Image (cartoon, coloured by chain):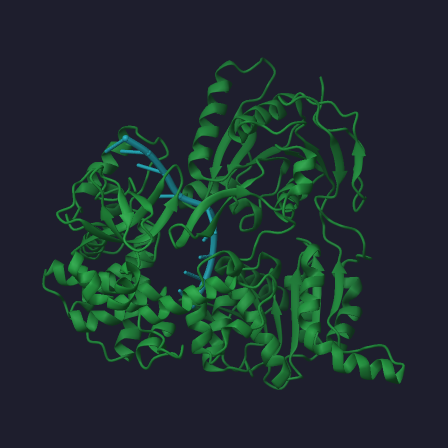
Chain colours: A green, B cyan
DNA sequence: GAGCACTGC
């Protein structure tokens, strides 16, 4: 039986060996195979963290910035902060902060380290995330937090003065908050030379992070050190740690595939039939593809060759219920092989042990700015080399593994090295507003990690924020509107709606709507698409439908949920009405938080008493940018950019003729068509009345 | 008539 992979050639840390004679049963014909250790480059000496303890502490002592390259399992996140603690870096009331890009990792890592240190969680070791602060203001020495939380902390304490060391973990993911935090840290460091900054990164970006801080650290001190004949001491240092990764053999398709979904199905099936035991992980881009792939594999199992085990097929994406998520981590039922079909969630957010085979479509769905519509949209794009290596590494967590890439090797070499950072690829209005609130006036000169946001995006964000009234003609934050908008933990358009609810006298309802649009859809979409369960869900949804659109429908859902609340009964009530209990509970939480902000701003909670027009006008006051006009054929055109748009099938306005010609919407999703999500019917006059500058300028 | 990568405040 031919194999995808040339067996027995993989070595940890080896260079990329070619094994051109490898055969393949993959459709595209024989594939070129090569081995590497799951994308782990081996150009530096790598040692386990415990053996490098002294070196790490020495580097932190000597260098204001240390970049730590450590694979999964190297212990950087859990061990390094403890070494710093033991070495006295948190003495004298100072704290060590460790940022994480996700809430879940902040909590779970903090819990683990607290157990290792031997203290109750929230005492010497604690965490701070939105809605949850398990830390003590004086006793906590190591604080794990989300990067967004630490960024917010800069608004209250611009020098982050309570921290002696700040470790920015998973910086290679290049989230917007991570990048902005690093830019701020570069500034803070100049005013607080004693502050130590540790950045944890993947191999490929380590030098870029070091260079970023070296730009202004190095020159003067380096010249001095050179003149004195001493080695430069002040530059950012890089250190690599040994991880616990196993080698992963990589195979490629010989030719480009016509359809990566079909190719993924074939590849998964052939792995199952031909390869020894070990779980399979397939990377696709979205829920639809996952469902299609699982269906196709289930169909093939109908005539499973004798002697082959059945496949236990499991989906993995963010929209799963808690029970479905738990199933992912269970070992495969006896006598079956587990096959996970996942989105990018399995690349960084969720790790599953036991995977031995990875099938990588080579594509990813990314939020990216579309100049045609003037807004962000989700689009399917080729992944980066860094992504491909990370995905391959998922096969080598517990044993040597294999990865099949559904594209030719030459195509891999043509992929971008890394995924563009969030700040450089998307609308940056929110970030611009927050940086302005931190007193950063010249945003073109902010220290962005390269690649910086394109200047057109900066201009666009500034213009838009001015049209919302958050910035004045000189680009300064307005008082109090702009300041308050920056403070609210929602995007600027929604922040404007919340603050305008004072004038429209509808803050009670707007708070609920804002909370609901901040969580994922409350309506449960069953896996079986258009099955009976789907039809039932549709019937349930209609009970909440408001003629005026999705925002008022969401308000109906929220109100019904709150009225239904009798302790544990509300979960049952959600089940009966096919609503997502977790999403609604989160909305209750968010509403309470937003309410506190409004109260602090002196905005009373006032109900519109059923006056829907007032509510819709208030929504339009923030979302006027996202306005569209209906066309005779039932499609829409955006008012400002004149781009073709369609009503999303999840909208209550889908297949419905709106009573007026205009709608505003929350966001765009680009799949088979360009869809608007979360729509509200508005009057044409409102747009020019509420946003005269924005629309007058556009129509001329 | 047809469907929402992933975070985060």
In the picture, the quarter occupied by the N terminus of chain A is: top right
Count of numbered circles in the view: 0
Q: Nearer the viewer, residue A322 or A160?
A: A160
Q: Residue at (65%, 46%) from the top-left corner?
A: A385
Q: Is A187 on the left or on the right of A669, as rendered? A: right
Classify residue A392 by image quadrant: top right
In the picture, the quarter occupied by the C terminus of chain A is: bottom left
Q: Is A451 on the left or on the right of A76, as rendered? A: left
Q: Nearer the viewer, residue A247 or A696?
A: A696
- As drawn, the residue found furthest toward the right would be A229
Vertical side of A322 occupied by A455: above or below: below
Q: Is A271 on the left or on the right of A313, as rendered? A: right
Vertical side of B4 occupied by A76: above or below: below
Q: Residue A365, how many percent across, how many down?
A: 49, 44
Q: Residue A412, how many percent across, how many down?
A: 66, 40
Vertical side of A37 occupied by A183: above or below: below
Instruction: Note whether residue A488 is visible.
Output: no
Q: Residue A659, how many percent across, how many down?
A: 12, 47
- As drawn, the residue found furthest toward the front would be A700
Classify residue A196 by image quadrant: bottom right
Q: Which of A64 and A98 is in front in this view?
A: A64
Vertical side of A208 occupied by A362: above or below: above
Q: Residue A108, how many percent across, how many down?
A: 54, 59
Instruction: Note whether residue A259 is visible.
Output: yes
Q: Residue at (30%, 30%) from the top-left corner?
A: A530
Q: Which of A631 and A229 is in front in this view?
A: A631
Q: Is A283 on the left or on the right of A680, as rendered? A: right
Q: Residue at (28%, 68%) from the top-left corner?
A: A693
């Amino acid at each position: 039986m031919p194999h995808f992979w040339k067996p027995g050639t993989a070595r940890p840390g080896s260079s990329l060996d070619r094994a051109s004679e490898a055969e393949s049963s993959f459709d595209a014909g024989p594939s070129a195979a090569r081995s590497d250790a799951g994308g782990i480059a081996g150009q530096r000496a790598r040692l386990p963290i415990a053996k490098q303890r002294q070196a790490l502490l020495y580097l932190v002592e000597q260098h204001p910035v240390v970049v730590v390259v450590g694979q999964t399992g190297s212990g950087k996140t859990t061990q390094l902060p403890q070494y710093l603690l033991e070495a006295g870096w948190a003495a004298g009331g100072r704290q060590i902060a460790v940022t994480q890009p996700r809430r879940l990792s902040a909590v779970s890592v903090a819990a683990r380290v607290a157990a290792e240190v031997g203290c109750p969680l929230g005492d010497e070791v604690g965490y701070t995330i939105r809605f949850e602060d398990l830390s003590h203001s004086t006793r906590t020495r190591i604080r794990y937090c989300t990067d967004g939380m630490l960024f917010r902390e800069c608004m209250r304490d611009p020098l982050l003065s309570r921290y002696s060391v700040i470790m920015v973990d998973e910086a290679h993911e290049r989230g917007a908050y991570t990048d902005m935090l690093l830019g701020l840290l570069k500034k803070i460091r100049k005013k607080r030379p004693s502050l130590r900054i540790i950045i944890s990164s993947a191999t490929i970006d380590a030098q870029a992070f070091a260079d970023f801080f070296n730009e202004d650290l190095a020159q003067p001190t380096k010249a001095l050190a050179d003149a004195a004949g001493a080695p430069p001491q002040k530059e950012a240092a890089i250190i690599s740690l040994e991880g616990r990764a196993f080698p992963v053999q990589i195979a490629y398709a010989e030719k480009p595939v016509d359809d990566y979904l079909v190719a993924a199905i074939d590849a998964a099936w052939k792995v199952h039939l031909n390869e020894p035991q070990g779980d399979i992980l397939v990377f696709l881009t979205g829920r639809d593809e996952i469902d299609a792939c699982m269906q196709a594999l289930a169909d093939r199992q109908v005539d499973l060759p004798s002697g082959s085990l059945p496949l236990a097929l499991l989906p993995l994406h963010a929209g799963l219920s808690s029970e479905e998520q738990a199933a992912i981590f269970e070992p495969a039922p006896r006598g079956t092989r587990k096959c996970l079909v996942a989105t990018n969630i399995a690349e960084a957010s969720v790790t599953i042990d036991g995977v031995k085979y990875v099938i990588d479509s080579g594509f990813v769905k990314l939020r990216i700015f579309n100049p045609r519509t003037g807004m962000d949209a989700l689009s399917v794009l080729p992944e980066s080399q860094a992504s491909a290596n990370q995905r391959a590494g998922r096969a080598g967590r517990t044993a040597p593994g294999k990865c099949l890439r559904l594209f030719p090797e030459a195509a891999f070499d043509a992929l971008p090295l890394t995924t563009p950072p969030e700040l450089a690829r998307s609308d940056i209005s929110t970030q611009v507003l927050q940086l302005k609130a931190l007193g950063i006036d010249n945003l073109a000169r902010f220290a962005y990690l390269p690649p910086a946001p394109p200047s057109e995006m900066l201009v666009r964000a500034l213009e838009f924020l001015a049209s919302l009234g958050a910035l004045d003609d000189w680009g300064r934050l307005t008082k109090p509107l702009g300041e308050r908008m920056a403070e609210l933990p929602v995007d600027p358009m929604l922040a404007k709606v919340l603050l305008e609810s004072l004038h429209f006298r509808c803050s009670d309802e707007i708070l609920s709507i804002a909370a609901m649009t901040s969580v994922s859809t409350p309506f449960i979409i069953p896996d079986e698409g258009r099955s009976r369960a789907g039809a039932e869900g549709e019937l349930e949804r209609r009970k909440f439908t408001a003629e005026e659109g999705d925002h008022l429908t969401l308000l109906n859902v929220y109100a019904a949920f709150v009225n239904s609340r009798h302790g544990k009964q509300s979960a049952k009530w959600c089940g009966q009405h096919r609503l997502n209990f977790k999403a609604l509970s989160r909305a209750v939480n968010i509403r309470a938080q937003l309410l506190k902000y409004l109260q602090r701003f002196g905005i009373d909670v006032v109900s519109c008493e059923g006056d829907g027009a007032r509510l819709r006008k208030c929504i339009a006051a923030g979302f006027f940018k996202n306005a569209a006009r209906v066309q005779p054929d039932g499609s829409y055109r955006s008012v400002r950019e004149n781009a073709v748009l369609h009503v999303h099938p999840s909208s209550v306005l889908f297949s419905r003729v709106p009573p007026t010609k205009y709608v505003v919407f929350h966001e765009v999703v680009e799949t088979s068509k360009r869809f608007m999500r979360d729509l509200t019917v508005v009057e044409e006059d409102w747009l020019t009345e509420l946003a005269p500058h924005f629309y007058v300028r556009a129509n001329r």
